[in-house]
Amino acid sequence: VGANEFGLGIHALAARAREANFPLLSANAESPIGEIQVAAIFNAQDVRIAVVGLTSEEVSRTGRPHHVKYVDVADAVRTLESVLPRIRDRADCIILLGNVTREEEQRLARAFPEIRLIIGAHDEAELPMRVGSTSIVSTGMFGKYVGRLDLTFDDGELNRIESRLIPLATAEPDPEIAALLEPYEAKLNRALHQVLGHAAGDFSRSTARESHIGNLLADSVRAKTGTTIAL
């Protein structure tokens, strides 16, 4: 469970959690949603694989206050110090599924070398990396890839991890899913195709320096709120 899952508020996430046919995981996010579990254990070919979920502490800083006021996200390291002793004897392998920053992933890999695999879902980093004996993988952002992981075990011990990204740009859409999405796309397109104005130049965008898009948004906020300064 990551920051975006709380984007529409507690009640919306609770409804989706009741509909889901898969576990929602977060060991360090306390909320009124009882369906969110600390971890899940899967048995694959007689190998017990524990998956522990983690949520970034950024939720409390970046989420809309009225959506996250009932969410308390604890420190990830202290959380794992409490959780891991409860699952070590029940699993042959522990995987961390974390919606945390790349810096937090590296911090966790150094703190818990017994976690051999961290699957990230927060930053857009697409290249795998190693921290000690821990592999950190991610599929990036915006659905550009799906990831494949091949784990090789010998006598219940994980001895090899192979990962690769599969591009989706040329993938054929599933007809059933395409038909399901069609009415929503048509509704969105009616709004998105409205012409609001014409740009006299390029709409450059930057998160590190002044840009045309940034200026446009700031000026729009100033015009709407009547303020002198907008950030």
Image (cartoon, rainbow, N blue to C red):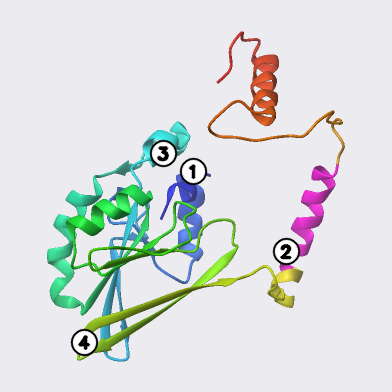
**49 left or right of 217 in image:** left
Asked if the residues shown at circle 1 and circle 3 are in contact, with their CB atoms under 8 angstroms apart, the answer is no
- Residue 156 tag number: 4
Q: What's the amino acid at mark 3? A: Val
The Cα–Cα distance between marks 2 and 4, rounded to whole angstroms, is 42 Å
In front: label 2 or label 1: 2
Residue that badge 3 annotates: 68
Can you give x and y, in whole percent of width and height, for residue 200 in the image? Answer: 85, 28
In the rendered image, residue 76, in percent from the top left (x then y), is placed at 25, 50
Say whether marks 4 and 3 touch (CB < 8 Å). Answer: no
Q: Which mark is residue 141?
A: none
Q: Nearer the viewer, mark 4 or mark 1?
A: 4
130 or 181: nearer the viewer? 130
* Residue linked to disc 2: 181
Q: Residue furthest top?
A: 228
Instruction: Name the N-terminal-most of marks 4 and 3.
Output: 3
Residue highlighted by disc 1:
9
The quarter of the displayed image where residue 131 is located:
bottom left
Looking at the rendered image, the quarter that the N terminus falls into is bottom left
Q: Which residue type carries mark 1?
A: Gly
Q: Left or right: where does residue 207 sit relative to residue 133?
A: right
Disc nearer the start of the sequence (4/1): 1
Q: Are marks 4 and 1 in contact (CB under 8 Å)?
A: no
At x 30%, y 44%, the residue is 73
From the viewer's side, name the closer residue of 140 and 194: 140
Residue at x 69% of width, y 17% of height: 224
Q: Give residue 74's position: percent from left, percent from top.
A: 25, 44
